[in-house]
Image (tube, coloured by chain):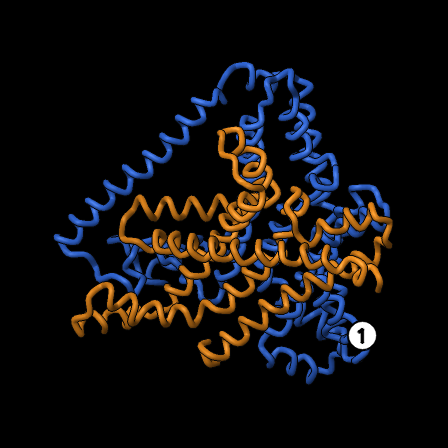
Chain colours: A orange, B blue
Amino acid sequence: MNVLTDNLSLYGKGLLGTVELTVYGSLLALALGFVMASFRVAPVGSLRVFGTAWVAVLRNTPLTLLFFAVLLGLPRFGVVLPFQLFAVLALGCYTSAFICEAIRSGINTVPTGQGEAARSLGMSFGQTLCGIVLPQAFRSVIPPIGSTLIALAKNSAIAGAFSVTELLGTYKTLNELGYSIIWSFVWIAVGYLIVTLTISALFNVLEKRWGVAR
Amino acid sequence: MSTTGTALYDIPGPHAVRRHRLYGVAATAVILAVIALVLYVLFDTEQFTAAKWRPFAYKGIQEMLLRGLGNTLKAFAYAAVLALVLGGLLACGRLSEHRAVRWAATVVVEFFRAMPVLVMIFFVFVALKVQPLPALVTGLTLYNASVLAEVFRTGVHAVARGQREAAYSLGMRKTQVMAYVLVPQAVRAMLPAIISQLVVALKDTSLGFLITYEEFLHAGKLIASNLDYDLPFIPVVMIISPIYIGMCMLLSRCATWVSRWERRSVKTEAVEVAPAEPGMLLPGADATHPSAPSHRSGPKTS
């Protein structure tokens, strides 16, 4: 128990790092995933190809390799950013592929008749998109996005191994200070449980509010 | 891939086709420009000099990479087999009729699903002071087994209820119902999901890099940090990533292929009948060509 009380600020800093990585990574992943999904359903062939390639490549890349390439590779092109930003970039790009697929299948669940009805009422493309298709897609997309973001929070642990301040990395300091390794890991596990359970609770609320009634 | 399936667009008319073509040209130009920029940066920072690529022609380096790849596949094979076995056991536990067993299995599955794999791997590696390979395999097994247990359980629940009821009413016992009726159907239905989870396991073997397991990425890192070869980091990434991505894509392709094979049912398959030919006669009308009218080709593979 005193592993936690003695090192509350260290754990706090680690937890904050994990939360920051998760939040920024999620925002980047959601934005990028949305753009890629719009590419994948676009009527323009080259954009579709680009979106498909983006998803196929990133979904099949091990995240460690991506971290390796981004954190150690980009500096060789003279791109020097704080490691945390690199980590967010890697996490966000990786997760965007999964978000893209979730959004795309969400859009595809909207029946074609909905769009046809909207157009026959004289709605413009923007009106059809914002008033008809996206609201319905949003409802069915909540659960898969929730589980993707939970995966992102868990994946952020890899950043710790690349010397970004986050929860898993705290074990090194505690180990050097001579605390019991088992207990320090127990509290790290609790920290991750807090983060993942918070995300899942948040998405449960969203689902209850807007999800598709089953 | 066509857009006619979505609710977003109508089938384009001549105007829209022209506009889309214009967008297409613009988008292609932008994408090509980005690719050109990347290539320019690569050439500008001298990533394609002979000094950086020469090491890959050396036998020792090639063997090192292959050894790394072998270690990656070894870890994957161990983790996959153990995860499938443990996942099966956990699924049995979750489906058990004894509350204590069910409860214990649920706790295990939920805990290991909520934990990052890396935390488990580090815990086994650091706290239990195990060699890198067993640590990696343990972490991967625990995580993937819990996910697979859920997959198996969903599969068993997804089998139509009548199947279970019919089996029980035939006098089968619980184990028989499971082994002969539910599990075969569940595994068949869940095979794509199981293979997708194995892709995750394959990708996660690269986490071994972080605990100094001498796998593929580790071999790459050793080459990349060699001063004699002018630090060929980018060439290493360019060689390693296609191999990793290729392996995972191959396995994913298996999943898609299996799911397509799965959807193909023998019962609903349209039997291809040879088109009638002018000389063809009705069955029984001509005894000299008994096989001609009832000609059937095998199940169509689409």
The image quarter in which residue B89 lies: bottom right
Residue B151 location (% of width, % of height): 63, 65
Taking B21 as reference, is B289 left or right?
right
Q: Residue at x 48, y 60 (%)?
A: B264
Residue B263 location (% of width, % of height): 49, 62
User: Is residue B250 shown to the viewer in this render?
Assistant: no
Taking A175 as reference, is A23 left or right?
left
Image position of B261 with respect to B36: above or below: below
In this view, the residue in front, A87 or B185, is A87
Q: Secondary structure at mark 1?
A: helix
Taking B193 as reference, is A183 left or right?
right
How many residues crowd around disc 1 within 10 Å: few (fewer than 14), some, or many (20 or more)? some
In this view, the residue in front, B174 or B149, is B149
Farthest-out residue, left:
B15
Q: Amino acid at mark 1?
A: Val
Farthest-out residue, bottom:
B169
